[in-house]
Amino acid sequence: GGMGLWPQMSLQDRLAAMERFLTELATQREPIVETLMWEIGKNRKDAEAEFDRTMEFCYKVMEVVKTDPEYAAQWQTIGSTHAMVRRAAIGIIMCLGPMNYPLNETYATLIPALLMGNVAIMKIPTVGGLAHLLTMEAFARALPPGAMNFVSGRGRDTMPFLMKTGDIDALAFIGGSKAADDLIRQHPHPHRLKVFLQLEA
């Protein structure tokens, strides 16, 4: 499940931390909306919709995790085996989102990964990444050190290096299929890597 503080926290404590994060994030709504407008040319209605849709998604994911029995640790008996069954973190998740929906699409993979106790590395898009800069302090105040990490820079210069270490346990990627294939091939154990893809042609 992981060795750090975040993976070892109880699910209830991670939910509480994510609640704190979302409360902090809500205070940044207007600056994030304006950043989406100025950096990638969204009109106000679309920028506000992206922020609000992202917040709604986060709360819905948390509600499912709180109420669905699948996420509760429980004793199960199969034959003569009696065991506590619970979900555990995969490890280090690298999340790469697109520039056109930098908040919504990225958080669709990031928030569930964090809630399950994974450590996340977010590659900030070169264009469309300024909105994420406005979230960093909220993450730092709500989550323990090392739970959420950011990488900036040109993807072709930063991502292959991280993949080649073999320390990335899962890749959440939204973008082109060629770029995804190239990244996966950089991993020394590509068949061990868990991959979550949303691909363009």
Image (tube, rainbow, N blue to C red):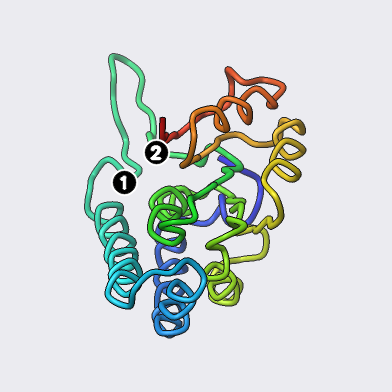
Q: What residue is shown at x 29% (from left), y 71% (from top)?
A: 52
Q: Position of residue 156 (x, y in %)?
A: 70, 41
Under circle 2, the secondary element is loop
Amino acid type at circle 2 is: Arg
Looking at the image, residue 69 lies above or below residue 183: below
Residue 72's tag is: 1
Q: Is residue 85 left or right of residue 70?
A: right
- Tell whether 141 sits left or right of 156: left
Q: Which mark is drawn over residue 86?
A: 2
Is the residue 77 above or below the residue 90 in the image? above
Q: Is residue 69 above or below residue 43?
A: above
Left or right side of 57 for 159 = right
Check contact, mark 2 vs mark 1: CB within 8 A.
yes
How many marks the image carries: the answer is 2
Question: Would you say 106 lies left or right of 73 here?
Answer: right
The quadrant in which the C terminus is found is top left
x and y percentages locating residue 155 in the rendered image: 67, 45
Position of the N terminus, as image quadrant, is top right
The foreground one among 114 and 14 is 114
Between 164 and 84, which is closer to the camera in this rendering? 164
Q: Residue at x 22, y 48 (%)?
A: 68
Residue sitting nearer the eye, 84 or 129: 129
Secondary structure beneath label 1: loop
Please give the name of the residue rendered at 29% of the width and 60% of the height, measured from the top-left corner. Answer: 57
Which residue is drawn at the image coordinates 45% and 63% (left, top)? 13
